[in-house]
Amino acid sequence: MDRLRIRGGTPLLGSLYVGGAKNAALPLMAACLLSDEPLTLDNVPMLADIASLAALLRQHGATVDRGDGGRLRLHAPTISNTTAPYDLVRKMRASVLVLGPILARCGRAKISLPGGCAIGTRPIDLHLKGLELLGADIDLSEGYVTAVAKSGLRGAHIRFPMVSVGATENLLMAATLAAGETVLVNAAREPEIGDLAHCLVAMGAKIEGIGSDTLRIAGVARLHGAGHRVIPDRIEAGTYAMAAAATGGDVTLIGCRPENLETVADKLIEAGVEIRAVAGGMRVMRRNGPLEGIDVTTLPYPGFPTDLQAQMMALLATAKGASVITETIFENRYMHVPELARMGADIVVHGSTATVRGVERLTGAPVMATDLRASASLIVAGLVAEGETTVNRVYHLDRGYERLVEKLTGCGAVIVREAA
Ligand code: EPZ
């Protein structure tokens, strides 16, 4: 297993390109199953999660081929296998996103239950309840969910009791081929869902309310092929913004969309970071002197994203004064806390709230990555800490950050990847 070796204390200076959004590319790839015509996606990042989903799609009968410059060509002329097996699904929860498309296209689908992961149990009850409302019979046995809709799916009025990105995506895709109108109320509003909806419309779907919490979908008989460019990754951009701010640097994030990071920018500015929208991206600078402690609560979009909570904590670990972080989305998303504490951070967790008391400095140490965003948090801390930090189990990072070492060294970071 590889590890990263970081020597902290160097301000990040320069610019880096923000890649395509992992959490947009994954549902977009699943959407290829809705049509018998080819779907071409551009700006798809080269990530482990993308490769995992490509492998799953291939065993359903799709071809998935890489072209130049982030292009992915997907084509599912037929779906030869409607079962998503445990050994593939367990690797990545987003595999559950093939459920809606396969059921809508074939009238049946059998998907291994994803199981939990480091940040929580992460059930799929909202996905299944929504599919039942669309007319599917759902059966759970031996770790698999089987969904059957012999006479096809029928439009329905679905109100989500809580906001769920994945459930919104699964049901949005299924509804495009359901007979009649479907209304999704209290739908998630993450930009990645808007990106998926725009691609589905390009494929011939009829969707209204894109970007709002109420989506109206008029089902159509079939969807045709399309081409679509994946939006930039706001979480990658936010991660590097926090690294730049933490190190007292000045970095331009090329290609990111500031409008998708407004709440994050507001919080960084509140902490004392200078943020400027520039042509084609965003410039992040740390004004002189320490940052100020602030309070952060994670919420569904447009609130502060849970996927940036760990990175923000690393940034606030050396701010002046105390910060209170409240995680409202996942029940166990503080796995990075003990590792940050090994580096000298002063953090106390009570339930879903973490109190971070700023310290003068962090010191480098060997630390362990536990999940994708916790790993990013340890890198932000390592870039600030005095001395050397080694981050083990770097495979977590490969799931969501393309060419991270190259991008950071391009801004002056002292970081190398080595086989452990
Ligand atoms: C998506 O996960 C993202 N993943 C996550 O990013 C992100 O943290 C999350 O949305 C929240 O923004 C992808 O897009 C591939 P949810 P998802 O359904 O869809 C509960 C990363 O680091 N819930 O919005 O799984 C669930 O347990 C990853 O890139 C139910 O109870 O998130 C969680 O507590 C991590 N029942 C909360 O809702 C359900 O049926 C939000 O989950 C579904 C979800």
Image: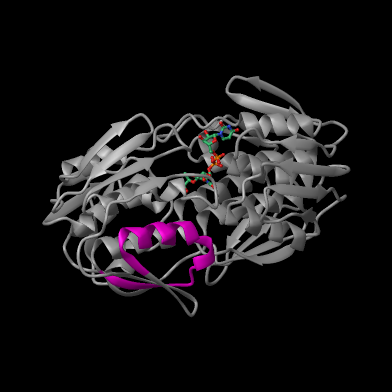
Residue lying at the far top of the rendered structure: 141
Q: In the picture shown, does residue 16 fall above or below 141?
A: below
Residue 414's x, y, as percent? 20, 65
**Magenta part of the chain:** 249-274
Residue extending farthest bottom = 279
Q: In the depicted view, which residue is nearer to us: 415 or 38?
A: 415
The percent coordinates of residue 46 (x first, y second) are 47, 60
Residue 258 lies in magenta, yes or no?
yes
The quadrant where residue 152 appears: top right
Residue at 51% across, 63% down:
20
Q: Is residue 395 visible?
A: no
Q: Nearer the viewer, residue 103 or 325?
A: 325
Q: Nearer the viewer, residue 114 or 233?
A: 233
Horizontal relation, residue 212 to residue 372: left or right = right
Q: Position of residue 378 (x, y in %)?
A: 27, 49
Across and down, in percent, residue 354 comes to 31, 38
Q: Is residue 325 left or right of residue 22?
A: left
Q: Does any portion of residue 10 appear in the rendered image?
A: yes
